[in-house]
Amino acid sequence: MYTQKNRFFTIKFFFFCLILFLSCKNYNLKTYEIGNVKTIYGDMYFWLYEETPLHKASFVALSNNNYWDSLSFNRVIENFVIQGGCPDVPEGFSNSPYLIEPEFIPEIKHLYGAVGMGRDNNPEKRSAGCQFYIVHDTLGIPRLDQNYTVFGQLFNGFEVLNKIATLKTDSLDSPIDRVSIKVSTLRLTKKELTELGGFSFLK
């Protein structure tokens, strides 16, 4: 005979199964690794290309270790790039934790908002793990293609890029007022990525 106790047990079991189902569904939800740079002017979000695994892995590892959080955008040139990390001088590059073999992908170009990794004039064109830049030229910079590795593409925060790129600078292209950075990587769901404007990268 179906009693009140049986009914209570059935309801409890139903909710247990529902919670378990939702938990499993959320656990298996696909996420995408995204780069994030926080500044006093706002946040910038960029896609990290799977096609450049060495540079992506380096960026993720250094950001997870808060490597850049004491550094800044130290080279700012309007209609060219804003550059962050170690200073763009021999002494700065010598502080790089390592160099990365180039990953030149013909389809990945220096478009407006492209995120690349800096380097010195080494003949192998290896990237310095300590430095990254974001292209500010709205027409792109084709002459950098196949010379510097692009590993990401900005999709949210172009107003922040424009603000930083137009700051007053000194004779060395360093902003008069320091632009500190806090760099991290985020794991976003398809819905979260779409809401931020990164839907074009979804396959």
Image (tube, rainbow, N blue to C red):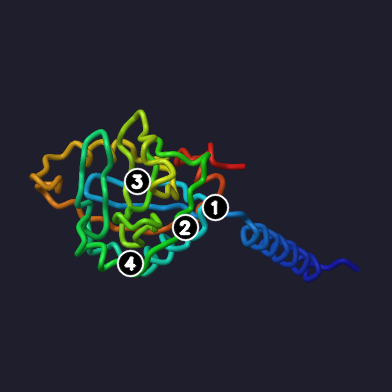
Report which quarter residue 184 is drawn in. Answer: bottom left
Which residue is located at x 78 percent, y 71 percent?
Answer: 5
Give the residue at mark 4: 66
Give the residue at mark 3: 44
Which residue is located at x 43 percent, y 63 percent?
Answer: 58
Give the residue at mark 2: 56
Q: Label 4 is placed on what type of residue?
A: Asn
Which of disc 1 and disc 4 is earlier in sequence? 1
Residue 26 position, x and y percent, is: 62, 58
Asked if labels 2 and 3 touch by Cβ distance under 8 angstroms, the answer is no
In 3D space, how far apart are the residues under numbered discs 4 and 1 (Cα atoms)?
22 Å
12 horizontally vs 150: left or right: right
- The extreme front residue here reads 123
Which of disc 3 and disc 4 is earlier in sequence? 3
The residue nearer to you, when weighing 56 against 9, is 56
11 horizontally vs 90: left or right: right
Residue 54 position, x and y percent, is: 49, 60
Which of disc 1 and disc 2 is earlier in sequence? 1
Which of disc 2 and disc 3 is earlier in sequence? 3
Which of disc 2 and disc 4 is earlier in sequence? 2
The residue nearer to you, when weighing 190 against 109, is 109
10 Å neighbourhood of mark 2: few (<14), some, or many (≥20)? Answer: many
Q: What is the secondary structure assignment of the residue under circle 3?
A: strand
